[in-house]
Amino acid sequence: MTAAPLAPSAAETPRVRTRLRRSVFWVVVVVAAVVFAVFTMLLTASGTPDGERYSLGNAGAEGSRAVAEVLRQQGVEVIAASSLDEARSAVAGGAATVLFTDPYGYLDDTGLAAVAGLGRSLVLVEPGSQELDVLAPGIEPAGAAEDAEEVAAACTLPAAERAGTVSRPTTTYRAVDDTTVEDSCFPSYDDAYGLVRLDTGPSTVTVLGTGDALTNGTITQAGNAALALGLLGENPTLVWYVPGPDDLAEGPSDTLGSLTPGWVTPVMLLGALVVVAAGVWRGRRFGPVVVENMPVTVRASETMEGRARLYARQGAHTRALDSLRIGTLARLSERLALPRQTDVVEVSRAVAAVTGRHVDEVHRILVGELPRSESELVAASDRLLLLEQEVARATLP
Amino acid sequence: MAVSGRFVALLALGVVPVVLLGELAGRALETLLVWIALGIALLVLDLLSAASPRAVRLERSIPGRLRLGETAPSILYLTHTGRRMLRAVVRDAWQPSAGASTTRSRVDVPPGERRAVTVQLTPFRRGERRTERVTIRSWGPLGLAARQATLLSPGRIRVLPPFNSRKHLPSRLARLRELDGRTSVMIRGQGTEFDSLREYVRGDDVRSIDWRATARHSDVMVRTWRPERDRRVVVVIDTGRTQAARIDDEPRLDTAFESALLLAALATRAGDRVDLVLYDRRLRGRVHGASGPALLAGMVDAMAPVEPELIEMDWTAVPGLVRQVTTQRSLVVLCTSIDSPGSARELMAMVPELTKNHLVVVSSVTDPDVLAASLERGDREQVYRAASAERALLDTARVTSVLHRYGADVVTGSPAELPPALADRYLALKAAGRL
């Protein structure tokens, strides 16, 4: 015969299964939220403006998506390039216009020289003097344009002529003394122009100071659109080359990443993991917290202390001395075996008789004098104690 | 689930292969992933092979009562009903003031066997101390991971008032025997109740010789007297808010308990009947009609769970309570505090009603700090403090004199002095035959 198996004690902790079942709603909610977030991110990621000026992907005021889209509709193949290699392979197709602008100065002289050989037709948008030196020798920046809303073409360049007027150029350019230029448009001050075209031999270089003609925000003003389309739509292919980080001259420079051994990152990961595991190890609670109602600790002398502080703050020396005197009187009359309700005069007389002091003096100590300051209060209290001690000594059996 | 420091160390040890293989073969990341996978695999394996912490039957063996300050073992029996070896750490969740010696104990229980976990309890607070749950953490054989469950297993221990004042009992009992005339020194009993006649022995008070009986007998006979017996003593303890204040780190209520216990121990030996009433606005405990050891046991039991309530004592109900206990003239001891005329107004209004029929003693704790402060007058602060202390003493004195006028007796003392003082007052009343 076997004994019936003992039933285990009731458990308070829910089983894993129960806990899962209880939390299934929240798991679903969290998963749904994550899926939704990822989905919307994927949806919007493609359309996110990158914010760069002259970027073909940027639909904002500073971007150049509009002109690219219109050119595409007109049958021009617009290819964005962000590195020299990309630009080279894009140009390889055939006759191409290369738009080049390098606002961040990624390219050095060697890179710029390479740009010079890119295509038959090169459009430089608001170039700096370094770019001009290499790509358009003989042209130099001539500072800001005259203050006017718009400037007229005043030249025979077809694109400029069609445009008529364009927005005020950001920068103007001029040809150095003996340089012969093919055409100069949009004059500003005496010999400064918003657009200069020259033939450098291998290619035709157009220096454009009116960058606003290309950006979405301003392309619709004046003849900007006509100028942009005319300049950029000359060839069936347009390579839109804005140099990026890939164009940086690659050198043997050591970065922190290339110097550290390959195991450092894994070790750091492992360290983070160990910290998390240690947190779980130390943080796991050993059962629920035990609650207990504890009594409040109230010291009985609190009221006395409180009253003392009130006396002190108010400087209530008369009242304080009164209390002290009443206490002394009670003790004295007890010691001298007088009835509890004895008159002060009687007590003074008895005390004087015992101690040999004068009755008036004792009376003054016990009731007479009025303290005018706190130092007098302390002195009076000392006299009371002294009197008590004298009486105690005198009445010792 | 819980992980151990061992698991954390195992993870951290992964640094060695990661650095070595990273240096030699340049495969640090792969090594890391393999190491983590290995760790987690071991963790899961360990977790799966740990015994279930739920398959445990818990039984307790706790002493029901314990005097405050004493130590008693609380034994928890774990019967393992599962099939795998249980390597457990057990936490018996006693309330903090139960003063458990340890809250965690290691215990290994093979399947089908039973093991005991003993915890020494030294409670530091009176009342009912409880434990509701036992948490069991069952480790796997590798000691990397554990399963954890909290099981219900209620237990409680009643912590009784310490009755420290029992050290005063022998001397008071000796005094009582003297009163009784039953001492080895043959003095005449001091009571007023005739006890018996016995033969004269040398040393007896010649005034107690009963000449009539001597004439009837052939020997000289003396009368012995004894104090009255079978008187009633009713102890009413105030459990209201003023009793919560601590004097010398002991609540007034506990001092009241000490005095009541000493008085009861003494009175029951003296042949009187003692009743106890704990009251604030409702009856919080009562001992009625017990005597001898049963009386003291009943009293400490009634007192154990009572804590001062944050409400004002309702004195108007006290005469009624006393009348419920007895209509006979009795000694009524009121354990309360008489701090100021303001807070004792109700008490003072009620006392005359009691003193009509009964002998009333009011017992109150005084603060030795106040007395000390009233004599300490070094500087300005201390003088003000002394003044305030004198004011407090005066307040107490005023209440005392009013109570005296109404015919009640007042016993005061510091927490250490009050219980013997009350016992002495009882003996004095008994000796005077006023009971």
Image (cartoon, coloured by chain):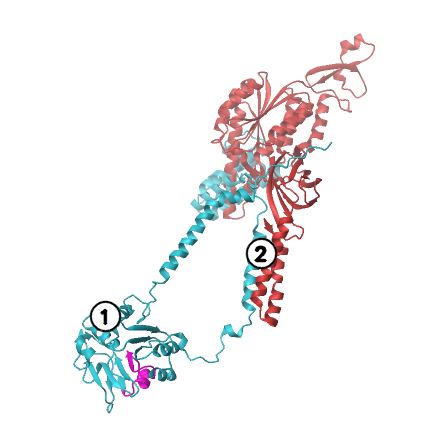
In the rendering, at what x and y percent does residue A390 appear?
Answer: 59, 41
- Determine the colour of chain B: red
Label 2: state its secondary structure: helix
In the rendering, at what x and y percent does residue B422 appear?
Answer: 62, 29
* Magenta residues (range): A117-138
Circles 1 and 2 in contact, beta carbons < 8 Å = no
- Label the cyan chain with its letter: A
In the rendering, at what x and y percent does residue A20 appear?
Answer: 52, 45
Which chain hosts label 1?
A: A
Q: Is residue A361 visible?
A: no
Q: Can you name the residue that lies furthest to the top here?
A: B216
Image-quadrant location for residue A239: bottom left
Q: Give the mark toward the camera: 1 or 2.
A: 1
Which chain hosts label 2?
A: A
Question: Could you tell whether B29 is left or right of A100 in the image?
Answer: right
Question: Is B136 located above or below residue A228 in the figure?
Answer: above
Q: Report the front residue among A202 and B15.
A: A202
In the rendering, at what x and y percent does residue B346 appear?
Answer: 48, 26
Q: CA distance from mark 1 to mark 2?
A: 61 Å
Question: Is A230 located above or below residue B252 in the figure?
Answer: below
Q: Report the front residue among B301 and B82.
A: B82
Residue occupied by mark 1: A219
Residue occupied by mark 2: A278
Q: Amino acid at mark 1?
A: Ile
